[in-house]
């Protein structure tokens, strides 16, 4: 795979895109011993030796963080009005959020500089499971289970893909993460786990709205094979290793 020299240097942590452009302009960067003339030159990281001031630069590769997103942060690289999730991870590595959670939604959010992985995780064809814990304004009814599994009309061109609904009751294991103010709801059938394979706009809220409920609280507990650890506090992020792509592809 070939990438631009300035992107390679920025990804490797040498500096920002404009800082590395300056280094190239000052003739301090070499490719296989030859002075690099332009930032847009394409290099092959596995084959070419890139050096700055004579020191070889090693490709730092991709990095992915799992963030426990708190409510109040928007999933954008920049925002004029609200704090962004990017403020909660190390800066300067071309990172971006993998998909979106609403501003008031909490839970597992991946932040990466690996565009290929992000695409695989988000592509509707990959059928990646995402499980959400939701607190509803009134108890979920058992009839929702077959409805959701058949697909719901939420006003889009096509119904939602089959989704798995579990209604938590007194016998269900404690789902964890339920904020203090929602504990009163836990025995009433208002707490549910919903697993979907798409990422449509406000999808979980719209699915419950379609059956006459409103979502009061929403948290994503898992994304593909990754599960939000109970030990990861709101606002904290950890580096994660992602399994090979095939694991995310639905077996047919
Ligand atoms: N569904 C929603 O309604 N909101 C989210 O943030 C994620 C899924």
Image (tube, rainbow, N blue to C red):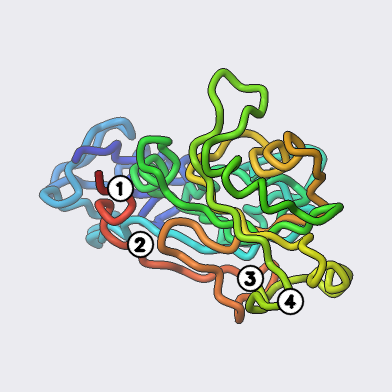
Residue 236's disc is: 3
Q: CA separation, marks 2 and 4?
A: 35 Å
Q: In the figure, is residue 1 to the left or right of 200?
A: left
Earlier along the polypeptide chain: callout 4 or callout 3? Answer: 4
Q: CA separation, marks 1 and 2?
A: 13 Å
* Secondary element at image label 2: loop
Nearer to us: label 1 or label 2:
1
Q: CA separation, marks 4 and 3?
A: 31 Å
Location of residue 37 by image quarter: top left
Q: Which residue is mark 4?
A: 170
Compare residues 108 and 184 and report the one nearer the observer: 184
Residue 249's disc is: 1
Earlier along the polypeptide chain: callout 3 or callout 1? Answer: 3
Earlier along the polypeptide chain: callout 2 or callout 3? Answer: 3
Compare residues 194 and 56 and report the one nearer the observer: 194
Compare residues 56 and 213 and report the one nearer the observer: 213
* Secondary element at image label 1: loop
């Amino acid at each position: 795979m070939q990438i631009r020299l300035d992107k390679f240097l920025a990804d490797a942590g040498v500096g920002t895109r404009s800082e590395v452009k300056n280094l190239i302009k000052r003739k301090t960067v070499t490719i296989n011993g030859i002075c690099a003339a332009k930032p847009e030159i394409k290099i092959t990281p596995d084959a070419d030796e890139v050096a700055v001031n004579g020191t070889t630069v090693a490709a730092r590769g991709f990095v992915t963080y799992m963030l426990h997103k708190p409510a109040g942060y928007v999933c954008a690289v920049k925002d004029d009005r609200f704090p962004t999730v990017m403020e909660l991870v190390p800066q300067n590595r071309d990172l971006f959020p993998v998909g979106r959670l609403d501003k008031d939604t909490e839970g597992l959010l991946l932040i990466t500089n690996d565009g290929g992985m992000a695409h695989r995780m988000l592509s509707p064809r990959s059928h990646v499971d995402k499980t959400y814990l939701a607190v509803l304004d009134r108890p979920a009814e058992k009839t929702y289970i077959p409805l959701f599994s058949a697909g719901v009309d939420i006003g889009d061109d096509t119904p939602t893909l089959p989704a798995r609904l579990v209604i938590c009751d007194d016998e269900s294991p404690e789902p964890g993460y339920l904020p203090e103010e929602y504990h009163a709801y836990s025995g009433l059938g208002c707490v549910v786990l919903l697993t979907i394979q798409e990422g449509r706009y406000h999808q979980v809220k719209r699915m419950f709205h379609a059956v006459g409920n409103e979502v009061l609280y929403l948290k994503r507990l898992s994304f593909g094979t990754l599960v939000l650890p109970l030990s990861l506090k709101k606002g904290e992020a950890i580096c994660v290793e992602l399994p090979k792509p095939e694991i995310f592809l639905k077996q047919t």
